Amino acid sequence: MDILAAINWNANPEIFHIGSISIRWYGLLFSIAFIAGYQIMSWVFKSEGKTQKDLESLTVTMIISTVVGARLGHCLFYDPVYYLSNPLEIIMVWKGGLASHGAAIGIIFGLWIFSRRRKKISWLWVLDRIVIVVALAGLFIRTGNFMNSEIIGKASDLPWAVVFQRVDLIPRHPAQLYEALCYLAIFLYLLFKYKKYKSTLPDGQLFGFFLATVFTARFLLEFLKKEQEAFETSMPLDMGQILSIPFIILGIYFLYRAWKGKEKKE
């Protein structure tokens, strides 16, 4: 494919800087994801009679769980030898390196602790609702990856192939945008399902749907992505695909569990 026929992309990851402080697209979109998520969960909590205090506690739990889980996931899944030999590097989040699978584990565990301390908020109740905003966050984060010219796709001759000029001059799949669009579709479906059926939805149905669809999309799209780490080049499945499989199985389990629960009620 002629490079001139491809979409050329050379966005600066930095929006602007003042002195030593810089504002970057990824950080801005990550922040917007939390702000939008807070607004949606505020609406959810009000509509279902939950307290503002619980919402604020949930917000803090989500921020800590997401960042800690994503960072530990990157360090332990993608380069454990280096980070275990240099443990102080683990806390240096500003150097980059966050893994979505680690974030998922962190969120699930963090919300389990959150619900254990509250009699009126069950673990599955909060998971069924938080996945709506997590899907939306995925859209913003993958858009941030696109702005950073990272997590790029493999070479492609499709008319919408993108040349990430900050990486090389090869037309590639805009894999970040494929994934972002998948998350947008999942978010819209979850939001529609919640708004229309929230009073009758079996516990765990939205959570199961989220896990099954998000990580199936992730598994399939990995075939179009360039390997992120050198050790993945010799593997039949890359690390992202291997880590996605347990989440897909877990999602199917919760969907089946929700279906059986609904069947019993009927």
Image: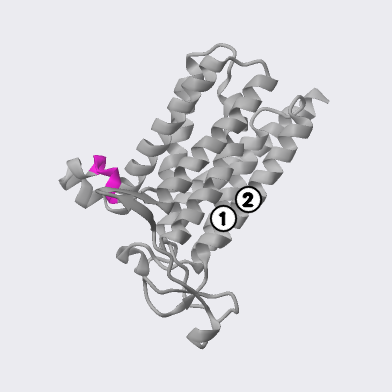
The amino acid on which the numbered mark 2 sits, given as a three-letter code, is: Leu
Q: Is residue 117 above or below residue 197?
A: above
Q: Is residue 10 above or below residue 66?
A: below
Q: Which residue is mark 2?
A: 184
Residue range highlighted in magenta: 90-95
Q: Is residue 169 visible?
A: yes
Q: Position of residue 162 (x, y in %)?
A: 51, 73
Q: Is residue 181 above or below residue 249?
A: below
Q: Secondary structure at mark 1?
A: helix
The part of the image, by quadrant, that contains residue 237 is bottom left
Q: Is residue 91 shown in magenta?
A: yes
Q: Residue furthest left?
A: 85
Q: Is residue 176 above or below residue 23?
A: below
Q: Nearer the viewer, residue 199 or 181?
A: 181
Q: Which residue is mark 1?
A: 180
Q: Could you tell whether 261 is left or right of 231 in the image?
A: right
Q: Is residue 249 visible?
A: no
Q: Position of residue 250 (x, y in %)?
A: 56, 40
Q: Quadrant of the C terminus?
A: top right
Q: Position of residue 61 (x, y in %)?
A: 44, 26
Residue found 48% across the figure and 14% down from its top: 117
The amino acid on which the numbered mark 1 sits, given as a three-letter code, is: Ala
Could you give the CA–CA distance between mark 1 and mark 2, rounded to whole angstroms? 6 Å
Residue found 68% across the figure and 37% down from its top: 256
